[in-house]
Image: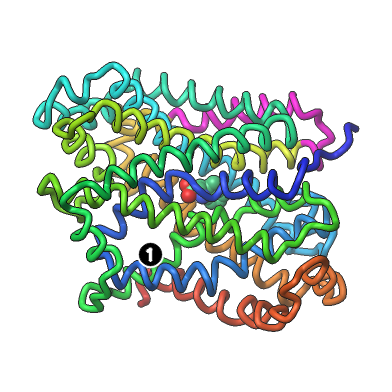
């Protein structure tokens, strides 16, 4: 069996993990749920969820990976065994489910990048771009085409391995992503709507806050930090002994949060300047923003920058999802990386076909929704974000806090960590606060609260 891959440096790991965290969740979803929940207070609750629930679980995942030097299934077996191993299996399943539909949304971003490069967004004008998204959503051909292209790219990166594939691409794409974000932020600063956007995102208005909003913030904290299915665990398993888990976990969480907030300060100034509503939902990025870009000076340039950024963010996240499955096949089945990558990638691409066809066929779209209440695509998203990730997160928190040997846990936490004092606080959050928070999300999901 080939030797297990390792990161070339601590920076490489932090960039790859931040690449996993920063994705469609930050740039597409966070701004629109902030808009739907009225901004301000929701953002504050979200920040609390990141600090009190997300960060402790992030540290736990990295710790389990580094301590075991294994991907999820092997990690649970090595550090505790028994029925806990089920949570490892759930993580691998999560990789299949999430990437299969994530790739479809990433495909939309690719299609819009193409529309931007071809100059179509500005040429069509604000009225002309409105039907574009509906047309894309309903087109089987376009969805299948871009889904396939995106999965091929993802397979191409993971094929190269931890150091020469994932880390290398993170080192290129993450600085580019930061640069593109900065260009867009400067543009936002010059727009008349910036002040209004600032007030919307950071002005504290409790009257807009609902219980559903609080629980949505908590659920999103898991998704945006790539927690609950062993992606951070797998990346942690490629860390060497002398890296500091706590400070890495903090850096990754801070970067992810900074990008999500910046995305708001990129998008909302545009929305307010062009007289649109912030609470339009999922169409924010694919409908409202193109309407504004079509009227903006240098609209084609900013459209290319924005949608390329969205594609890059999605790609570095998708590779972490594929890596969980690939790494499972390598560790547990003894497969070689190339074989594992291609098989996992192709099967996930096939599982994604019904998602790609959810807008254009009755079988997976309206007809499916008539029977199951949601189309295939929405069903997968719902199952993953509302059930699999919180359940996985609960398993990871309980396992780390109540099952893993304290000597191992303490040693890993404190090894190289300047923040050893926080050990007790971290453990308390993991033992009580995180499980209670997650159980509340479940109770909400089944309508009890
Ligand atoms: N965090 C990514 C985003 O915000 C998505 C993602 C990548 C993810 N890997 C994950 C979500 C693992 C949950 C689990 O878009």
> Residue 342 colored magenta?
yes
At 38% from the left and 57% from the top, the residue drawn is: 261
Q: Position of residue 188 (x, y in %)?
A: 27, 47
Q: Nearer the viewer, residue 34 or 335?
A: 34
SS label for mark 1: helix
> Residue 86 colored magenta?
no
Q: Position of residue 91 (x, y in %)?
A: 63, 51
* Left or right of 336 on screen, residue 435: left
Q: Residues within 10 Å of mark 1 (few under 14, many from 20)?
A: many
User: Could you say which quadrant of the image residue 278 lies in?
Assistant: bottom left
Q: Main secondary structure of the magenta part?
A: helix
Is residue 90 visible to the viewer in this orientation of the structure?
no
Q: Quadrant of the N terminus?
A: top right
Q: Nearer the viewer, residue 406 or 38?
A: 38
Is residue 266 visible to the viewer in this orientation of the structure?
yes
Q: Position of residue 185 (x, y in %)?
A: 34, 47
* Left or right of 301 on screen, residue 12: right
Q: Nearer the viewer, residue 142 or 82?
A: 142
Tell how many labels: 1
At 83% from the left and 77% from the top, the residue drawn is: 406
Which residue corresponds to mark 1? Answer: 216
Q: Position of residue 139 (x, y in %)?
A: 29, 23
Q: Give the extent of the magenta segment.
A: 330-353
At 9% from the left and 30% from the top, the residue drawn is: 127
At 74% from the left and 24% from the top, the residue drawn is: 339
């Amino acid at each position: 069996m080939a030797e297990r891959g390792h990161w070339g440096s601590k920076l490489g790991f932090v960039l790859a993990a931040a690449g996993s965290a920063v994705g469609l969740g930050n740039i597409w979803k966070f701004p629109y749920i902030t808009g739907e929940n009225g901004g301000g207070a929701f953002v504050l609750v979200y920040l609390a969820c990141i600090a009190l629930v997300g960060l402790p679980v992030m540290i736990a995942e990295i710790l389990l990976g580094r301590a075991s030097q294994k991907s999820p299934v092997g990690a649970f077996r090595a550090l505790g065994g028994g029925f806990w191993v089920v949570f490892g299996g759930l993580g691998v399943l999560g990789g299949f489910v999430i990437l299969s539909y994530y790739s479809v949304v990433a495909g939309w971003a690719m299609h819009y990048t193409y529309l931007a490069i071809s100059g179509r967004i500005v040429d069509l004008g604000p009225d002309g771009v409105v039907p574009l998204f509906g047309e894309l959503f309903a087109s089987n051909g376009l969805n299948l085409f871009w889904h396939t292209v995106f999965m091929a790219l993802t397979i191409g990166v993971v094929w190269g391995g931890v150091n020469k594939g994932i880390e290398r691409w993170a080192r290129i794409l993450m600085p580019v992503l930061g640069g593109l974000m900065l260009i867009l932020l400067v543009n936002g600063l010059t727009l008349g709507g910036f002040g209004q956007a600032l007030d919307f995102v950071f002005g504290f208005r409790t009257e807009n806050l609902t219980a559903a909003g609080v629980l949505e913030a908590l659920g999103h904290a898991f998704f945006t930090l790539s927690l609950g299915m062993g992606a951070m665990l797998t990346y942690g398993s490629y860390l060497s002994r002398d890296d500091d888990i706590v400070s890495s976990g903090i850096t990754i969480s801070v970067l992810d949060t900074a990008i999500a907030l910046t995305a708001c300060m990129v998008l909302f100034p545009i929305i307010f300047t062009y007289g649109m509503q912030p609470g339009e939902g999922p169409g924010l990025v694919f409908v409202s923003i193109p309407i504004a870009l079509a009227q903006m000076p240098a609209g084609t340039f900013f459209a290319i920058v924005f949608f390329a950024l969205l594609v890059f963010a999605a790609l570095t996240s998708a590779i972490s999802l594929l890596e969980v499955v690939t790494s499972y096949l390598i560790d547990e089945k003894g497969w070689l990386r190339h074989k594992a990558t291609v098989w996992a990638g192709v099967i996930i691409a096939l599982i994604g076909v019904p998602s790609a066809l959810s807008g254009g066929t009755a079988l997976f779209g309206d007809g499916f929704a008539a029977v199951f209440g949601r189309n295939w695509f929405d069903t997968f998203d719902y199952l993953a974000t509302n059930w699999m990730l919180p359940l996985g997160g609960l398993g990871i928190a309980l396992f780390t806090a109540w099952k893993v040997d304290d000597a191992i846990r303490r040693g890993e936490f404190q090894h190289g960590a300047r923040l050893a004092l926080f050990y007790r606080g971290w453990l308390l959050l993991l033992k009580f606060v995180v499980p209670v928070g997650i159980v509340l999300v479940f109770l909400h999901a089944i309508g009890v609260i």
